[in-house]
Amino acid sequence: MSLLSAEGLVKDFGGLRAIDDLSVSIDEGELVGVMGPNGAGKSTFFNCVSGVIPPDDGTVTLDGTDVTGDPPESLAHRGLVRTFQNTRELETMTVRDNVRLAAPDQPGERTLPALVRSGSMREHEETVRERAEELIETFELDHLADEYSSNLSGGQRKLLELARTLMLDPEVLMLDEPFAGVNPTLTGEIADHIRDLNADGMTVVIIEHELETLTELVDRLIVLRQGRLLVEGEPEAVLEDERVIEAYLGGDAE
Amino acid sequence: MSALDRLPSGRGDRALIAGVACLFVGGLFALTPLQASLPSALYVFVEVGITFVIYGMLVLGLDLQYGHTGLVNFGHVVFFAVGAYATAMLAAQDSFSGIALGYPWPLALLVGVIAAALLGLVVSATSIRLRDDFLAIVTLATAEIFHSIFVNFEGVFGGNVGILGVPRPIAALVGDADTRLIATILVIGGITLITLAAVTRLTDAPYGRVLRAIRADELVTRSVGKSTIVYKTQAFVYGAALAGLAGGLFALYNGAVAPGFFTIQVTVTIWIGMLLGGAANHRAVLAGLAIIMGLRLVSRFGLSVTPVSGDVFAAFRLVVVGLILIAVIRFRPAGIWGDPQELGVDQ
């Protein structure tokens, strides 16, 4: 059954149609890659689905519910979490606080429990801390836990962002270029993490330019071009498709 | 766990205990025949001290808004003024000008806090989505609009004269001037300390983590499931309500309110105090405010020993304040006790 689907999405920026009648469907437990040349509308597609910008037309459905235009915070509660192309860390917070922040349903995030230091807040915070430590350890950031995240390298930021999103235990994880600017060793590690998460049942959608890693990783590839769906299917088949080669290597546009 | 790690623990509880103790001792002076005597040389210190503890509530609210949440509020004085005027108009009896309704003062104080909070809510509802500098302009404009309303609607707000005849609960209980001053500073200072305890608890809890995350990057905070608009509105309204409380207490201490007490000078003083001490650190902003107000006190003595006229001296004082601000921004952009990494102002 389709867990996340977009039907007829349209988004214009002034005179430019960034995505044009795009329909994509992603099944539960799938690991899907989204690729396409620069300007193909990959990030706009992500932004429209994740509520960062509202689409001009079309619908987004998550687990059977229409979530078109819902803000990111309510999508996060429904189990859809994303990362950003240029890693966005909370630079003025420590690695620990970055990860802990994402914990859902913390009663201490409301005024009254915070003021009276309620028991439920403290108990919850204990579990939040344990879970955050686990994630920080999993992503090998433990030696940096007390560093402000502004001091992290590009690759470490990618790891931190992943750890932070996992704090929410999402059903659908949307990763916008998780390997960009990351060295090959770390790329391999991040890919392993993603594979593990998917093996545990998480649905993952990845935008990536690093084709080699992506094709090895995903079950299915979706290729966008000029805001439209160009080709989709098994990675090997897609990469050999004439239209994809043309889109990437040039040739006559239209 | 390191020092950077904020546990929701006992921090701020000393302030709570001290605040309750101050209120208790202040209450003793006010309600029992117990008397205090104060050398007359210290009068001026206690008077500035009372202003300090009132402004302390303002700076704590502003720190919640700007220091923690990153909301730039350049019109904080308006909430102070609205709290003061609402309290004064409801509680005053036989004011020379403006409206005086003569209700009991506790009710008036409560209405003062609510009025300021409501204004905060209105400003939030219209403007909280604006980016930093635009919110700054809106709040600055709000303050100026209200200032001229207070001056020009003479029938309601008493014009430049303001509202007189506001009851002074502590003065009504204590006849003796020395005891009255001591009781006032203890009671209002106690309330400021309790405010400090409350905001410390709030910002040490996961609640504060969300506020600081909004300051760092609002979109990320939203994408991990926090309704940032709700938090920004709450922080703004809480700051406004605290300013309203400070205003109400000021009216009940001063016995009168007038536009001259609520000029942009108040906003400037608390902003400089906050930046000087170090935003996002409650005790630091209070210390910063103490420094800037202490400077004013010192310069008051300075006037009597310098051979220049009052006008020249006042201008000179502003120059000094400006120089201090420049020095802070140049050499310690995070303030004296502020954390440059936490505020994102690496030197």
Image: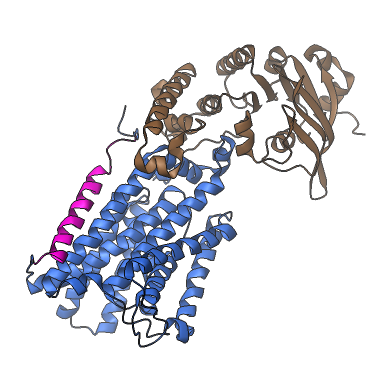
Chain colours: A brown, B blue
Q: Residue at x 80, y 25 (%)?
A: A223
Image coords of residue A29 (percent x, y) = 69, 16
Among the 4 quarters of the image, the one containing residue A53: top right
Q: Residue at x 69, y 37 (%)?
A: A47
Image coords of residue B32 (percent x, y) = 11, 64
Q: Looking at this rendering, what residue extends furthest in the front direction?
A: B103
Q: Compared to B177, does A128 lie above or below?
A: above
Q: Compared to A55, does A218 lie above or below?
A: above
- Viewer can see residue B120: yes
Image coords of residue B252 (percent x, y) = 29, 71
Which quarter of the figure is the C terminus of chain B placed in? Answer: top left
In this rendering, position of residue A201 left or right of residue B272: right
Which quarter of the figure is the N terminus of chain B placed in? Answer: top left
In the rendered image, residue B28 lying in the magenta stretch gets the answer yes
Q: Residue at x 71, y 19 (%)?
A: A28
Among the 4 quarters of the image, the one containing residue B244: bottom left
Q: Compared to B237, does B30 lie above or below?
A: below
In this rendering, position of residue A249 left or right of residue B29: right
Q: Which residues are magenta?
A: B8-33
Q: Residue at x 25, y 83 (%)?
A: B310
In this rendering, position of residue A239 left or right of residue B322: right
